[in-house]
Amino acid sequence: MKQLIKNFTIDETELFFASIGEKAYRARQLYAWMYGKNVATFDEMSNYSKSLRALLKQKCVVSPLICEDRQTSQIDGTEKFLFKTYDGHYIESVLLKNDFNDTGRLTICISSQIGCQMGCTFCHTARIPFIRNLETAEILDQINQVRRLSGLSNNNIVFMGMGEPFMNYNNVIKAATIMNYTFGFHLSVRKITISTCGILPRIEQFIEEEHLFNLAVSLNDTSSEKRSVSMPINRKYPLEKLADLFNKKMPKAHNRLTLEYVLRKDNISKDDAKRLKKLFKYSRIKLNLIPLNCSTDNTARPSDEEIESFIKELEILNIPITVRKSLGSDIDGACGQLSGKKYSDSL
Ligand code: SF4
């Protein structure tokens, strides 16, 4: 099988070129073509000789994903892309451009796994079979493809698509590192957010390795008993231990921490606000409230009035609070709705 060349860091790319008798500077040239000029084939790399291009084509692939479908929301212009992987599976990425005029932010939400094993009850991805982790090249190629197809250059990345990023820790960190290279996509570490449902050992590793990417944790309940139902991972890594880790270790890491909180009718009481205050002491926290998109028999989305009154209760936390608009809901592109079209018919 051919190698996915975007799996390589710059050092690994230099080693690869050395292995075929080429100079190290070829690696920087390759990065400039792949990430700067965003070309999809070796044929377009005009400063390589014909024979080098032929050799590279024989050994490697630049763009491992094939775009099979593209949908645009009639409500807010959000675009969802369906990609087929080299082994015939499907993942989705979303381009969120609604707040570009207000904030200048253009975000791509990317996937890190085909399926997910975490079983969160509010999430469509949890309802499809888990296949495998995405390779670094497949994570990066989502950005290449969305940029190429949309003609837009994003400046923000969130790992909030299909899959649990910290169950694919090495490939995700490697991809985020390549995104940050000046000769990669050159995205600021502060514009790359990795979201986890709370894989405690990997969060600890992330803090200890001193990565500067933004960290987001999907919280969604304030009592362990209820969180264990909506997010089964809580049985293994309970809420209290998560909060304890952040309170003790985050001040040294200085990372910004975002708590993601999907709003349901049954998790927005005054007591929830009080418990949140008691749990989290770290000062660089922001709370991101997300009205439920994926209702089940047991859960329902609260009304606007109920959300407003919960926000009032949360004032005791004295931290920034945002309510995420539900984007692309008419194309199943909103938070918790990604599943890969080919699987979703059975949902
Ligand atoms: S919310 Fe995230 S971690 Fe939970 S099942 Fe969905 S993709 Fe997996």
Image (tube, helix red, strand yellow):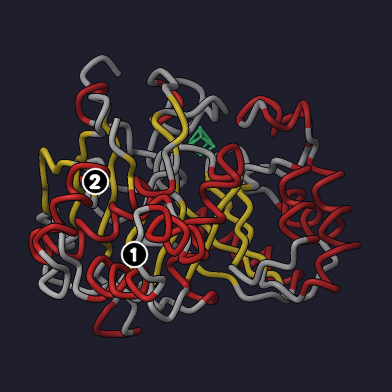
What amino acid type should be assigned to the residue bearing mark 1? Glu
Any mark on residue 22, and which?
1
**10 Å neighbourhood of mark 1: few (<14), some, or many (≥20)?**
some
Q: Nearer the viewer, residue 27 or 69?
A: 27
Q: Residue furthest top?
A: 346
Rounded to the nearest angstrom, the CA distance separating label 1 from label 2 is 18 Å
Q: Which residue is mark 2?
A: 61
Drawn side of residue 115 relative to residue 98, left or right: right
Residue at position x 38%, y 78% in the image: 183
The residue carrying mark 1 has its beta carbon less than 8 Å from ligand 1: no
Q: Residue 249 falls in which quadrant of the image?
A: bottom right
Residue at position x 76%, y 26% in the image: 235
Residue at position x 16%, y 41% in the image: 66
Q: Residue 253 falls in which quadrant of the image?
A: bottom right
Residue 182: percent from left, percent from top:
43, 81
What amino acid type should be assigned to the residue bearing mark 2? Val
Tell me the quarter of the image containing the C terminus. Answer: top left
Total marks placed: 2
Residue at position x 19%, y 74% in the image: 37
Q: Are marks 1 and 2 in contact (CB under 8 Å)?
A: no
Q: Residue furthest front?
A: 21
**10 Å neighbourhood of mark 2: few (<14), some, or many (≥20)?**
some
**Quick one: SS at disc 1?**
loop
